[in-house]
Image (spheres, helix red, strand yellow):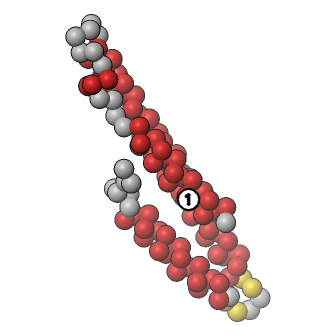
């Protein structure tokens, strides 16, 4: 359960930061001195923020998937037989991993 929460939180975390968007030229008075330099600085800062937040989101996703895998392994070792939940959750985790790989370049906004 905690693993799924971490995976969902990382997606929300990254998307909330992406909603803000990069600085736009209409936000600055381009006739003022230093406006272009400030816009370039803000654009660079926004790019750095996206990179850092994307990295933190990736770490949270990896941690969440690791917790899900750990839960699968704990569940599978039920005495002598392989538990039915192991097979079902393995399919779910496989789908989650494939969706994660496929959606890396797709954003909601």
Specify the farthest residue to the right. 79
- Examine the rendered structure and indicate whether residue 2 appears above or below residue 75: above
The residue closer to the viewer here, 16 or 76, is: 16
- Examine the rendered structure and indicate whether residue 91 appears above or below residue 30: below
The residue closer to the viewer here, 39 or 32, is: 32
Specify the farthest residue to the bottom. 81
Number of numbered discs visible in the structure rendering: 1
Specify the farthest residue to the left. 31
Q: Describe residue 41's horizontal placement relative to residue 9 as left or right.
A: left
Q: For residue 89, what is the image quadrant?
A: bottom right
Assess disc 1: are there few (<14), some (14-19) or many (≥20) residues with their C-alpha within 10 Å of its C-alpha. Answer: many
Q: Which residue is mark 1?
A: 7
The residue closer to the viewer here, 88 or 22, is: 22
Q: Name the quarter where the N terminus is drawn.
A: bottom right
- Examine the rendered structure and indicate whether residue 84 appears above or below residue 34: below
- Examine the rendered structure and indicate whether residue 34 appears above or below residue 73: above
- Residue at image x 74%, y 92%? 80
Percent of width and height locating residue 46: 39, 32
Percent of width and height locating residue 10: 53, 52
Specify the farthest residue to the top. 33
Q: Describe residue 9's horizontal placement relative to residue 107 as left or right.
A: right
Camera sees residue 55: no
Percent of width and height locating residue 30: 24, 15
Q: For residue 90, what is the image quadrant?
A: bottom right
Q: For residue 22, what is the image quadrant?
A: top left
Q: Describe residue 21's horizontal placement relative to residue 30 as left or right.
A: right
Percent of width and height locating residue 2: 67, 61
Q: Circle 1 sits in a helix, a strand or a loop, which is it?
A: helix
Camera sees residue 1: yes
């Amino acid at each position: 359960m905690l693993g799924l929460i971490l995976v969902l939180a990382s997606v929300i975390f990254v998307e909330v930061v992406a909603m803000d968007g990069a600085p736009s030229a209409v936000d600055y008075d381009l006739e003022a001195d230093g406006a272009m330099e400030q816009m370039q600085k803000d654009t660079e800062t926004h790019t750095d923020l996206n990179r850092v937040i994307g990295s933190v989101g990736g770490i949270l996703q990896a941690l969440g998937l690791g917790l899900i895998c750990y839960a699968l392994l704990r569940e599978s070792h039920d005495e002598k037989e392989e538990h039915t939940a192991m097979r079902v959750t393995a399919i779910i985790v496989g789908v989650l991993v494939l969706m994660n790989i496929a959606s890396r370049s797709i954003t909601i906004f």
